[in-house]
Image (tube, grey):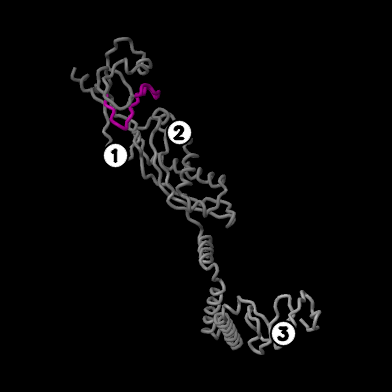
Amino acid sequence: MGFFSTNILKAIEWADPSKDTIVYKYPMDGRKIVFGSKLTVRESQVAIFLNKGKLADVFTPGTYTLHSSNLPILSQLLALPYGFKSPFFADVFFINTKQFTNQKWGTSNPITMRDKEFGTIRLRGYGTYSFKVDNAETFLKELFGTNSTFSTEDINQYLKSMLVSNISDTIAESKISALDIASNLNEFSKVVTEGVSEEFTKLGLKLTKLIIENISFPEAVEKAIDTRSSMGVLEGQMDTYVRYQSANAIGEAAKNPGTGGVGATIGTGMALGEVIRDSIKNSTKPAAEEEKPAKFCPECGHKNRVNAKFCSECGKPLAQKGKCPKCGAEVGKAKFCPECGTKQ
């Protein structure tokens, strides 16, 4: 009787001490189960009985007293007679159904995409994701097998490959620019989550969260983006920017006269003078003189204000629109006045 009592399981339960164990096989160590034994399934756990690798009965969170009524499939597999009370062998697996968060993912190789602005470029990305076991029976059939334990490390590489593959497909199918992806990471994460969820479901899993923390570009593309941003800031001031850059370049060249000889130094000085002269000319030119039209005197040719009626130089009357400046007769577009013959 002492031998039988030490080889019979009276209580079966699993207190998960780890943070990354997905499946735990209860250690039988040659011991048997008897009807009347207690089974405790904690929150965020599912217990499954197997017989010779075949899935039998599934238990959700709760406390159970084992008997043939709550082990109908196992009783059938073992061909146990009605009222059977002798000990029997069976495997018990606990599946952790909590969320496994902060799982890392990243692109081991760049993702090649065709961008409408930059042509063919290669992107890299990284982030985190969370998942949980949504269907314990499917998970055991598809991934676990009959190992003693199964952790996130055992499946992480496979899930990362699924995510990166789906991200690549989503980028190719969306045909959106790389800049739009980088500036809308949250929206893009949602699209990828919808696309890859079916693949997780096939494994009995559920992708609960996907975070794309960063999408990075090659160095040449990043420089092109910086240049374009700078040009956008300088829009409307490009003439000033060009003169400033030219003056700097000429100044740097003048510091190294030995690189181009005397001719280069003279050319540098002449070019610098042209830039400075043009800059001073443009900066000192009155805005009113550039923008407002002028009225010229038909007698002395002096330039007057556009709304002036008499010349400020010789005092002669200025031409009104369509009228002779001498007699005031209507001339329209004629070259000579039809009344006095004055040249218009």
Q: Which residue is mark 1?
A: 18
Q: Nearer the viewer, mark 1 or mark 3?
A: 3
User: Closer to the N terminus: mark 2 or mark 1?
Assistant: 1
Residue 57 covered by magenta stretch:
yes
Query: Callout 1: 10 Å neighbours few (<14), some, many (20+)?
Result: few
Could you tell whether 323 is left or right of 30 in the image? right
Q: Which residue is mark 3?
A: 298
| Camera-nearest residue between 244 and 284 | 284
| Camera-nearest residue between 186 and 142 | 186
Rendering quarter of residue 277: bottom right
Rendering quarter of residue 283: bottom right
Q: Which residue is mark 2?
A: 201
User: Closer to the N terminus: mark 1 or mark 3?
Assistant: 1
| Camera-nearest residue between 155 and 292 | 292
Mark-to-mark CA distance, 1 and 3: 101 Å
Mark-to-mark CA distance, 2 and 1: 25 Å
Residue 186 covered by magenta stretch:
no
Amino acid identity at mark 1: Ser
Task: Give the magenta range.
Answer: 39-58
Viewport quadrant of the C terminus: bottom right
| Camera-nearest residue between 302 and 66 | 302
Viewport quadrant of the N terminus: top left
Q: Residue furthest top?
A: 82
Amino acid identity at mark 3: Pro
Q: Nearer the viewer, mark 2 or mark 1?
A: 2
Q: Residue furthest bottom?
A: 314
User: Closer to the N terminus: mark 2 or mark 3?
Assistant: 2
Amino acid identity at mark 2: Thr
